[in-house]
């Protein structure tokens, strides 16, 4: 009953405004304008703000594996891909941010959401239109008869105003929900940019690693074929067996068998990069570069788990969707309350009867309509329950997204730390094998060891380098994954700049 009392009081106040104006001798036009201003102030009140959701599980003050990264300054660089110091990678990412179709699609969703918000906002204001008409009627009857059935000509023009007065706040709730949808769409565009940048970096490193491993595998295959040739020669000399020759040839063929998968990996990475860049997939993006060097990225700040809520675009979008569905729940509840509609028409008309002109006169029509539900067989209540369930679903989705986000950061930190340990061990192994190779070469020159032993040491060095190359790739991918899990340092300002650049190029 509290809301009904407020509504009645509001209507009574409107009636008092009309009465006071008419008693003072104000014109009807001033009366209408004053009433319109009063109703505008009434309907312009904003809906109550929606409080931010809380995670279903309290977040820890720090990540469990944060020892692998700095605790502060998480992903402080907007252009995080530049941390590798690779000009080719930087150029590719920046090109993708300006040409990728997924980002362009996300931008269109932003435009749709903003248009929807503007449409809902317009419902809070009166709709004003202009109407005009002209009519002429001639009977052709004698003048005596035309006294009862006159010939007429009428010119009419006026301004029409129609307005749904948002007493219960349903229209304002719809407006706020649409604005929240716009926030979610904008965060989605930021997320699309982050995904594209991380995928470009990932495919770039996979391609560079495929080229490097192809070079090593081909060298291993050649070394093994040389060994097989040497064993075959020793077989003819009676110094080796057919078993040794078959084993040596099998090893060479095993290395040859590794070439096609690496070539397929390099080819698919090229085409995926081309699609990400908006290029023709039939044209290679980059060529093999023997001078490529892996640049390790270090000191990526992990920050604190609670910072993910405001940094990751997917969490920002999920939170905005929670707000949107909560506002729509308020819109659904507002259907129970009365609605007030105001319409007004004013203008001038020029009338002529039997060639007799009448002076132009003014006309006006003002109507105030009231509608309130009484019985609808539970339709409104069902709508409220359905919308409340949608709001709860959005909240649960946000809470799950928070947990998944923390999991992704923890996994990335752990992977990065363990891969660094593996790389250190492999690096030490490569160094020891290279020293043993130098000793084997010295012994071979002095005639103290045969060629087979030297070739075996060479293969071990190449095999260790192959494992180290794979570890370098995994380290780079772990860094990319960590940047992505942390939100990439993709601040709203940086994302907006990239999105604006993409929009300019798209149009």
Image (cartoon, helix red, strand yellow):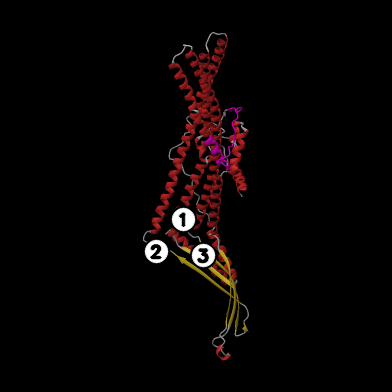
* Label tally: 3
Q: Which residues are magenta?
A: 267-295
* Whole-number angstrom distance, CA of label 3 to CA of label 2: 25 Å
**Where does label 1 land, which residue?**
331
**Sooner in the amino-acid sequence: mark 1 or mark 3:** 3
**Taking the image as drawn, is residue 262 in sight?**
yes
Label 1: which secondary element? helix
Label 2: which secondary element? loop
Q: Is residue 221 magenta?
A: no
Front residue of 106/284: it is 284
* Whole-number angstrom distance, CA of label 1 to CA of label 3: 25 Å
In this view, the residue farthest toward the front is 236
Query: Residue 334: percent from the left, percent from the top?
Result: 45, 57
| Labels 1, 3: front one | 1
| Labels 3, 2: front one | 2
* Whole-number angstrom distance, CA of label 2 to CA of label 1: 18 Å
**Where does label 3 land, which residue?**
13
Q: Looking at the picture, does residue 46 appear above or below residue 412?
A: below
In this view, the residue farthest toward the bottom is 144
Query: Residue 351: percent from the left, percent from the top?
Result: 60, 80
Q: Looking at the picture, does residue 464 appear above or below residue 187?
A: above
Question: Image quadrant of residue 91?
Answer: top right
Q: Main secondary structure of the magenta part?
A: loop
**Where does label 2 land, which residue?**
374
């Amino acid at each position: 009953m509290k809301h009904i009392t407020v509504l009645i009081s509001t209507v009574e106040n409107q009636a008092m405004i009309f009465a006071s104006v008419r008693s003072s001798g104000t014109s009807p036009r001033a009366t209408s304008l004053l009433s319109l201003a009063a109703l505008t102030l009434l309907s312009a009140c904003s809906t109550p703000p929606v409080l931010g959701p809380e995670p279903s599980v309290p977040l820890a003050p720090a990540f469990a594996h944060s020892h692998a990264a700095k605790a502060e300054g998480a992903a402080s660089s907007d252009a995080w891909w530049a941390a590798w110091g690779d000009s080719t990678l930087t150029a590719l990412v920046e090109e993708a941010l300006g040409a990728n179709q997924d980002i362009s699609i996300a931008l269109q969703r932003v435009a749709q959401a903003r248009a929807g918000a503007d449409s809902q906002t317009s419902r809070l204001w009166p709709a004003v239109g202009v109407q005009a008409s002209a009519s002429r009627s001639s009977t052709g009857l004698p003048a005596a008869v035309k006294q009862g059935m006159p010939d007429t000509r009428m010119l009419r023009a006026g301004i029409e105003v129609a307005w749904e007065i948002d007493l219960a706040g349903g229209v304002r709730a719809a407006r706020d929900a649409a604005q929240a949808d716009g926030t979610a769409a904008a965060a989605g565009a930021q997320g699309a940019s982050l995904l594209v940048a991380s995928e470009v970096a990932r495919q770039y490193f996979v391609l560079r690693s495929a080229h490097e491993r192809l070079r090593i595998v081909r060298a291993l295959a050649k070394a093994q074929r040389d060994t097989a040739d040497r064993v075959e020669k020793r077989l003819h000399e009676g110094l080796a067996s057919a078993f040794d020759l078959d084993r040596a040839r099998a090893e060479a063929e095993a290395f040859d068998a590794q070439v096609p998968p690496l070539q397929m990996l390099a080819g698919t990475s090229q085409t995926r990069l081309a699609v990400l860049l908006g290029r023709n997939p039939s044209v290679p993006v980059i060529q093999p570069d023997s001078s490529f060097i892996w640049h390790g990225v270090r000191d990526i700040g992990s920050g604190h788990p609670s910072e993910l809520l405001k940094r990751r675009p997917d969490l920002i979008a999920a939170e905005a969707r929670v707000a949107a569905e909560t506002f729509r729940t308020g819109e659904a509840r507002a259907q129970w309350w009365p609605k007030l509609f105001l319409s007004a028409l004013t203008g001038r008309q020029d009338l002529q009867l039997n060639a007799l002109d009448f002076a132009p006169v003014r006309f006006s029509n003002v109507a105030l309509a009231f509608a309130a539900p009484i019985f609808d067989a539970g339709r409104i209540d069902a709508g409220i329950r359905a919308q409340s369930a949608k709001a709860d679903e959005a909240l649960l989705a946000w809470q799950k997204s928070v947990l998944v986000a923390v999991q992704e950061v923890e996994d990335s930190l752990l992977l990065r730390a363990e891969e660094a340990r593996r790389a250190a061990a492999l690096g030490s192994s490569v160094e020891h094998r290279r020293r043993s190779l130098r000793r084997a070469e010295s012994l071979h020159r002095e005639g103290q060891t045969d060629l087979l032993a030297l070739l075996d040491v060479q293969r071990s060095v190449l095999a260790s380098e192959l494992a180290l190359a794979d570890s370098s790739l995994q380290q780079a991918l772990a860094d990319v994954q960590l940047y992505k899990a942390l939100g990439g340092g993709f601040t709203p300002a940086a994302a907006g700049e990239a999105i604006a650049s993409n929009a300019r190029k798209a149009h």
